[in-house]
Image (cartoon, coloured by chain):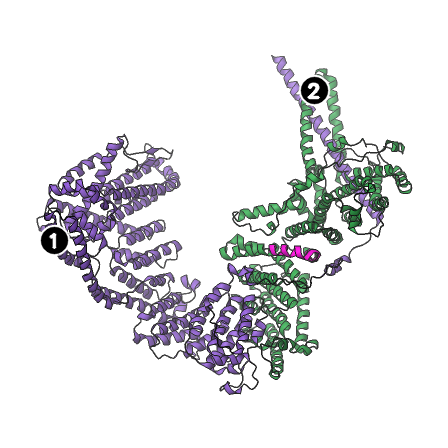
Chain colours: A green, B purple
Amino acid sequence: MGKLGKKARKFAKKNLQSVLRRKRKLKSVFKKKASKKDERAEAEGVEADETELSITRNNVFEGTEDASLDAVFGEDESDEDADDSDSDGYLSEDESFSLVGETELDSHLEDKKVDGTLPVQNNEARLELAKKMNKLKRLKDKDPDFAKFLESNKKRLKALRDEEIYSDDDEASDSGGESADQNTSGVDVSKMLSSSSIDALYRLAKEQQSIPAFIRLLNAYRAACHCGTDSSSVIQDSFSFSKIVMLLLAEADDMFRKMLGVSLSNERKEAILELKNTSKWKATRPLIKSYLRSTLQFLNVVTDHQILAFVLTRVRASMMLFVAFPALLRRLIKVSVHLWAAGQGTLSVHSFLIIHDVAAVNSECFETCFIKIYGAFIGHCKSLDPVLLKHVRFLKSSFVELCSRNMHKSLSKVENSTQQLVKILQIGLQTKRKEAVKKVCSWQYINCIDLWVEFISLYIHDYDLQPLLYMICQIINGVAILFPGPRYLPLRVKCIQWLNQLSSSSGIFIPIASLTLDLLEYKIGKESLKPGSNFNFSSALKFPKYWLKSRNFQEECVLSTVELLVAHFAQWSYHISFPELATIPLIRLRKFHETTTIEGLRRVVKRFIDQVEQNIEFVRKKRDEVAFSPKDEQSVESFLQLERSSNTPFTQYYGSMMEKAATRNLLFAHK
Amino acid sequence: MVKKNKKQKVILPPALPAEISEDEIEVSDEDLEFVHENLDYAAFVSRLDTQSITKHVSRVAGLEGDDALEASYEKRKNKKENNEKVEEENKLYVDPVDTLPVKTLDGQLYYRTSAVSGTVENIEKDKIGRDEKDTSMRLTKAERRAKLKKNKKEAKKLKDLDIPQDQKEQAPQAAVLAEVKEELSAEEAFKRKKLKLAELGMELLTDPESNIKSLKEMLHICKDDDPTVVILGLLSLLAVFKDIIPGYRIRVPTEKELEMKVSKEVKKMRYYESTLLSVYKAYLQTLIRLEKQPKFQHVAVRCICTLLESVPHFNFRESLLSAVVQSVGSPDDVIRKLCCTTIKSLFIDEGKHGGEAILEAVRLIADNVKALHCQLHPDSVEVFMSLAFDEDLGKAEEGYHNNKVRNRKHRKRKHAEESSQLQDNDRKRSRQEMMTKIREEVSADYKAACFTLDVAERRRIQAETLSAVFETYFRILKLSMQSTSASSETDGNSVAGVFGAHPLLTPCLNGLGKFSHLIDLDYIGDLMNYLKKLASGGDSSDSSEKCLTRLTVSERLQCCIAAFKVMRSNLDALNVDLQDFFVHLYNIILEYRPGRDKGELLAEAFRIMLYEDRQHDMQKAAAFVKRLATFSLCFGSAESMAALVTLKHLVQKNVKCRNLLENDSGGGSISGSVAKYQPYASDPNLSGALSSVLWELNLLSKHYHPAVATISTGILNMINGNNQVLLSTLSPQQAFMEFSLGQRVFNPTYYAKKSSSKKNRESGRLKLKNIEQFLGEIKSFDEDELQAKLSNHFMLLHDIKEHERLRLELDRTNLALQLHEDYEKQKRKARKV
């Protein structure tokens, strides 16, 4: 949800319950964010959420250990505004253009039928006002003394009103550095623009390269973009509003480029920096700045996804121009990170593309991007329902993608973050206190691990990530150990999956057998296994208690065990020590096979045992033929290299198991 | 002179002063003068450990005369205090420290203003006969200060205690009493009782002898209806008793003795003692009665424990002990902990009471265990671990004699010094000699009376204690053996649920390990058999034992460990076959589960059974090497490290095991009876491990944990047979501790930080390979739609603004209308006026 003006939101909250309700229905996701922000000055934006979060968390931890996930990167926001606050007024205009039709003032507002409660309420209010006014007037007429009295009390009235306004103003100036008084320094621009005059101006600017016309357009654009927050508005009807916005967004970039003499295809950011000292630049700089500023403001105000996406594509097109304004760049980062995290689908993608471009500007930008995006990510993955799953996955992969832009920087950041994870985990392991443990078993924590697991498995081949890998393995092991109970089966499964993923992507041996085999030991008290209701496995870290008694649970345990072990074994199925690797799990599985009574599970386990034994036999036979010793690493590496390409039974079995698992999960997701 | 002797006493504790009643010592005026003049000589007295001296002095006791002496100590001190107060401060209030000030609810403090004068006079009178002692007494200022402080602390404690309770209780109580008695509010009654308690307590502390009757009064208060008052009373009495109970046991005089004519003082003393004893008894009875009421349980247990800890030598120890032992297995954590620490301190502080209390306690615990069929909290047997048995009691006898001789010499030397000091005084010297003689006589008496029992007695006590302890241990073992069918029906409740079917087995095995060197050799054979069976965990083929509730893996490991400890501490003197234990361990390894079982135990078993094993059985070693390697493939880094450290050690020790590192395709020469490796065999000797190859190590060298990877590679490289055995300094236990998920594991220093960053790939232009799927969603924009949306947006904004404006207007008009009302009112008022 974009940022409506503070006033507007306050108003909406007071009077527009139904509208709000509708909005909430539409975008329940954003609502959370927005309503939270209502309570705070919005300038703080996303980070405010984060800092608040970390503050509350620190309180939990008695401030001794700064153990919140997001407190890793200290952020300093304060420098922004100072840089930002140089004049954001209107550009000075050439008065000569005032002649172009500025006459038609009658608003088209009333004739347009806009449904919704707002106009109705407005009408009601208007009626009431009229009634009251009449009454007042009658009173005044009846009693002239009262009129005098009223006059004498006017000051009081006024004071009261001012108070109201001031309080509003305070908030308004908070809300983006655009207070009304800035306009006073500017020129009087309260002349109305109609759509035809816009057309005319555009023609002038486009064909004759008329700078004053362009300025006029830019001012109009600014007014339009500030529509919600500014009191004086040039734009009075919706048609001209949409026209000016569309026009500027579509054409401004081109026009600037033309003015600067930079070709469209020239995407190099250095180009603009080279231009920096030329007179051409000096002439156009204020125009560009005004345009960019207005566009950013517009991004803050608009809520509609499509509009936002469109604006973002245009912003991206003129990214080159942004480079020259670091302060604006920072604002852009803030806005786009917010949209990236809060938006959905295309909007997120567009915002990410912007972030991606911005991050490429320089390492400082990359750092801010990284920090903001991390904060937004952490703030955004507090809960995970199936709807959000895809979005979070997108956030994760785009984040990981972003890291590749500056590996050196991001590596150190990732290290910091993992250190933070370690700290939290250690508190959990040492104190075993409820709140500390709860913090580990939270989606934030889990998603964070997930993020870095993905990061490592993507980049481990290209970079030296061994220490990080080791770290994250320890963290995952620690998490698995911290939550041993059967209720935490999903978490345990997740941990083992991570380890498998890391192992298969890095080619490093990570033992998971004992962690996995524990799943088989989860005994449910009574054998009264009801089929039990379905439960979505992927969106929980912990099962509800009642679920533990169901038959599904036991199935889940056994099937997960088999799937995880298959994945583990499949990776090493060609390794020379596969027989030894499988020895202990086989013993355990055989025992389980003997004791279990559920026929379906017995079959699955039996098949698995058979497959593994077959592979053991296969490897052993091959192994007996070789003459090298375990010490001979190269020979061991080349062992069964040939067979690796061909499909052994075990590989086939692995493939079929994975398919089954996928369908099973799909079933769950659909139920 | 008396002082000087005391000094000696400090240095040589056993040689205690001649027990001389005041009357016997003639202290001439000259003596007094001398002391007065040479105060410097006497300065050391102030540094004396007066407390211990008092203890020794009173120990000599047994005779009434000395009680008087002790009492006089008390009195003197109090007198001094009071005098000082009067002289120095000369205030209306008696010093706040002296009396317990009472803080009323409104926060004012009331001090007792009089009441001491009587006692002062009393003391004055008492003093007359013992003037000669005054010299020494005067110098014990330090002691007095200490006392003073203690009192202060006690007073504070009491205050601290009663204030919160007081606030809690008073509300309901007030309601009840207000109905009954109007003129006397409950608060006042409560306050009065409190005040009374404080007064009585202070009186008793300042002068126990003359105020001994107040004890009864205090006890009476303890029977109050108000639970708070009861608690206060109990605690005050506790403080008083702790302070006034003498350091000896009071013997009730026989009838014959009672008939005998005695001096007034003795009579007084007798009265004092009998009162003390009877009240103490009643107090204990009250405590034991109250212990059963949940309301007072904690307080009562605390009192009992404190008493047992501070006065274990005194009468009625038995009832205290039995009460403590009863609650040592209490389900209440606080109570249990309190009792455990009390018993432990009892075991450790042998000197306080002689060994007898220990024996009694151990016997009581043993009975308790027997009565409850071993279904107790583990802590109740765990306390045995604090027992200390003097192994060299036999030898001690000689040593004791030697010591004596040495002591004597020592003493002589001391005397010599002293005499040189007092050389000029011949009379002094002669007296000195006389004193020495007397001392020797006394020391004989002392030995009879004092708590340091002679060696034979101590040995007897120790033997009995030991037998009681082992009786308990064997009972537990035996019960665990038969376990079951019977007890599984009865238990299932209480402790059993939390600590498994055999709650006492763990502390029992620990204890066996600790005291293994004290076990009679005759029993060891049986013991080993028991342990063997237990270690098998009921796996044995007997169908009858199938029903046996299975021991946990940890318990079985402990059995193995205990067995090895027993063998080790008996210097392997017995020819017991430990082979079975190896078989058990070989199988237990497979059953180990990281979360459920204690990894420390596994590591300890590795250490004691494999790492430190002195046998060189090649088959067995190879089997374990293979199993440990396989084990490391499946478990976490801590377990793996423990196993690998052991493995490395085994390979180092057994040269032939190094063959496992080589793929000797022929194999045959050493592979023994079994030609092919049987991974699933349950007997290490039949596994044929010698014919296997340690391929695991290769996989382990790819382990994510750098330490595991390093040690695996290290082992692989031992192949070259360079016999310079690099003994790894790490024991399996240390390895386990170091690598279990604790503080240090997350320390990435295991890396030598080889920052050989791989080919730093150029970060390509917008690769976006993993968000490609999402990029597909980008659509082109429909301009008309956009325009429509934009206008909607504008309309919304406009409406909002409009609405705002209207509201403002409306508010203003409303205000104006309101003003009109005001205006009307004013006008009316004006009219009225």
Q: Which residues are magenta?
A: A391-417
Decide: marks 2, 1 in contact (CB < 8 A)?
Answer: no
Residue B631, position as x, y percentages in the image? 52, 73
* Residue hosting label 2: A150
Residue at the extreme right of the image, as rendered: A207
Q: Mark 2: which amino acid?
A: Leu
Q: Are marks 2 and 1 on the same chain?
A: no
Where on the picture, by quarter, is residue A163?
top right
Relative vertical location of residue B828 with respect to residue B731 in this rendering, above or below? above
For the residue labelled by badge 1, is the local secondary structure a helix, a strand or a loop? helix
Q: Is residue B640 visible?
A: yes
Residue A44, position as x, y percentages in the image? 66, 42
> Residue shown at 50%/85% (left/top)?
B670
For the residue labelled by badge 2, is the local secondary structure a helix, a strand or a loop? helix
Residue A444, position as x, y percentages in the image? 61, 54
Q: Chain of mark 2?
A: A
Q: Nearer the viewer, residue B720 or A120?
A: B720
Is B129 left, or right, of A406 in this rendering?
Answer: left
Mark toward the viewer: 2 or 1? 1
Relative vertical location of residue B47 with respect to residue B684 in this rendering, above or below? above
Q: Chain of mark 1?
A: B
Q: Residues under labels 2 and 1: Cα distance?
A: 119 Å
Q: Mark 1: which amino acid?
A: Glu
Where on the picture, by quarter, is residue B367?
bottom left
Residue A219, position as x, y percentages in the image? 81, 37
> Residue shown at 14%/41% (left/top)?
B32
Where on the picture, by quarter, is residue B676?
bottom right
* Residue hosting label 1: B433
Residue A6 covered by magenta stretch:
no
Q: State whether the magenta stretch is mostly helix, strand or loop.
A: helix
Residue at the extreme left of the image, as rendered: B261
Is A56 left, or right, of A364 in this rendering?
Answer: left
